[in-house]
Amino acid sequence: MKVLIFGSTGTIGRHLVDQALEQGHHVTAFARNPEALGIDHTNLSLFPGNVLDPVSVAAAVEGCDAVLVSLGSSKLTGKVRSVGTQHVVRAMEQHGVRRLICQTTLGVGDSEANLNFYWKYLMFGLILRSVFKDHGAQEAVVKRSSLDWIIVRPSAFTDEPAAASFKHGFPATEEKLTLKIPRSEVASFMLQQLTDDTYLRQTPGLSY
């Protein structure tokens, strides 16, 4: 499958690129500086561009089979997730690319009830307030689209190796969540959604 990854040099994006290549996909890594991946692979194409530029986004989307979005920013303000995803959605609809897997965060929408006091009021309510708002706007963009989308809502990222089966697709009433998930597991789950319709047009959360 020809997959296009936005945010390919980010902490989740790097795992997406590595695992997609291991699975035999033809990968296009879109980023401002995709050379930073430091990967040389026959099935890897590097596409330098800015997700805030709709022209470069559209050029990258043309001809691919599916798109994975894991956008982020070192800044705690801005709208790179929502605006960038809007450009991705428009390009996909323009070129007839149907499958979109978009990573946001646990806590958006009805999953707010899954958060504890620390994440609900300190992190997302104060420190990461703008980031959280941008994720909410990003989800709204995806949900308004005509695409075959799946929004993946992971809990806080760790670099720990996979240790046990994690929970996914749990209800807002789910209790005893650690609110942590390894980055490698997030990438693995996102790639599974390329061909699995279990969560089609749904927003599964991920957490140990």
Image (cartoon, rainbow, N blue to C red):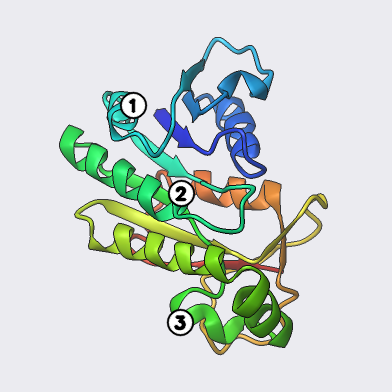
Identify which residue, 38 or 200, lies in the foreground.
Answer: 38
The residue at 25%/39% (across/down) is: 92
Sequence order check: which comes first, mark 3 or mark 2?
Answer: 2
Q: What residue type is labelled 1?
A: Ser
Residue 141: percent from left, percent from top = 30, 59
Q: Which amino acid does label 3 sit on?
A: Asp
Residue 127: percent from left, percent from top = 67, 71
Q: What element carries label 3?
A: helix
Q: Can residue 198 be seen in this view?
A: no
The residue that mark 3 highlights is 110
Task: For marks 3 and 1, give the one nearer the viewer.
Answer: 1
The residue at 35%/34% (across/down) is: 53
Residue 114 sits above or below residue 197 on the image: below
Q: Is mark 1 on a helix, strand or loop?
A: helix
Residue 32 sits above or below residue 181 on the image: above
Sequence order check: which comes first, mark 3 or mark 1?
Answer: 1
The residue that mark 2 highlights is 80
Q: Distance between the residues labelled 3 and 2?
A: 23 Å
Q: Distance between the residues labelled 3 and 1?
A: 34 Å
Q: In which quarter of the image is residue 181?
A: bottom right
Count all numbered tags in the image, as a single digit: 3
Sequence order check: which comes first, mark 2 or mark 1?
Answer: 1
Image quadrant occupied by the N terminus: top left
